[in-house]
């Protein structure tokens, strides 16, 4: 895409959804860290279902430690890989209490020190809570970036670097939300719904399906 096409791409997505937000539910920075860590290989809907009762009880790392690993497992057992995720959440909570005074740090370097928190999770927290212009590349953004031609790359890191270089200033804060939602609901993995895509004419995907399949 050209610079003008990229601007128009985001302008249209922004017009359709002026204030995009993560679909994960949380009440503070700590709960956001936990929710994003739990969302790996799981749906936001599934995570929200599991954390609804959990977050009513647990708002701080200390409260999570008091709940304990087994208590946490009882809340998140419907989420995939819940055993390893529970272990990581308890470990990251311990680190936050011991080294950060129970507060979530505001730098990527500190966030990725937390067990179970990788670059993508750190970028989500930095963007959603601290208002930093980061690009958390999940499977949806990776697909949309490559499929549309917006930001091609063989790895999430390569796509992130392209986005960081190409996304224009007015749209940088909301970019990763627009791309995730676009990939989740329109530019789907198996069958992209090009017939209702607001940026279909800007997209370089060759196998566009411009007519809605007839229901059987």
Image: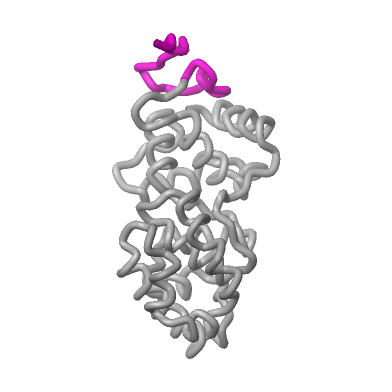
Residue 196 in the image: above or below residue 139: above
Magenta residue check for 123: no
On screen, 74 above or below 200?
below
Q: Quadrant of the C terminus?
A: top left
Is 29 or 86 nearer to us in this picture? 86
Q: Which residue is rendered at x = 61% and y = 27% of the image?
A: 8
Q: Is residue 176 left or right of residue 85?
A: right
Question: Which residue shows up at 44% across the image and 42% down it?
Answer: 141
Residue 132 in picture, x, y percent from top left: 60, 59
Q: Residue at x 67, y 42 (%)?
A: 170
Is residue 166 depicted above or below 125 in this figure?
Answer: above
The residue positioned 61% from the left and 46% from the top of the image is: 174
Percent x, y for residue 43? 43, 49
Task: Name the quadrant containing residue 147.
Answer: top left
Figure quadrant of residue 192: top left
Residue at the far bottom in the pictured view: 98
* Residue 107 on image: x %, y %: 53, 71
Q: Which residues are magenta?
A: 194-216
Q: Position of residue 146 (x, y in %)?
A: 37, 34
Name the magenta segment's main secondary structure.
loop
Q: Is residue 134 left or right of residue 78?
A: right
In the foreground, 170 or 111? 111
Q: Is residue 77 placed above or below 212 in the rendered structure?
A: below
Q: How is the image coloured?
A: one colour
Choose top left, top right, bottom left or bottom right for residue 57: bottom right
Q: Nearer the viewer, residue 78 or 106?
A: 78
């Amino acid at each position: 895409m050209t610079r003008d096409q990229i601007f128009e791409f985001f302008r249209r997505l922004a017009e359709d959804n002026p204030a995009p937000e993560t679909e994960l539910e949380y009440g503070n920075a700590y709960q956001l860290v936990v929710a994003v860590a739990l969302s790996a290989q799981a749906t936001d809907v599934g995570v929200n279902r599991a954390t609804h009762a959990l977050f009513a009880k647990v708002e701080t790392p200390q409260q999570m430690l008091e709940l304990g690993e087994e208590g946490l497992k009882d809340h998140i057992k419907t989420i995939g890989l819940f055993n390893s995720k529970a272990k990581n959440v308890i470990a990251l909570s311990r680190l936050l209490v011991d080294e950060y005074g129970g507060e979530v740090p505001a730098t990527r370097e500190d966030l990725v020190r937390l067990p179970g928190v990788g670059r993508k999770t750190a970028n989500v927290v930095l963007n959603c809570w601290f208002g930093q212009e980061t690009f958390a590349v999940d499977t949806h953004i990776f697909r949309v970036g490559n499929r549309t031609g917006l930001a091609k790359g063989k790895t999430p890191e390569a796509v992130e670097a392209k986005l960081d270089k190409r996304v224009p200033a007015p749209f940088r804060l909301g970019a990763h939300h627009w791309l995730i939602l676009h990939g989740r609901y329109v530019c789907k993995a198996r069958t992209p719904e090009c017939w209702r895509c607001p940026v279909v004419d800007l997209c370089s995907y060759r196998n566009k399906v411009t007519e809605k399949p007839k229901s059987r």
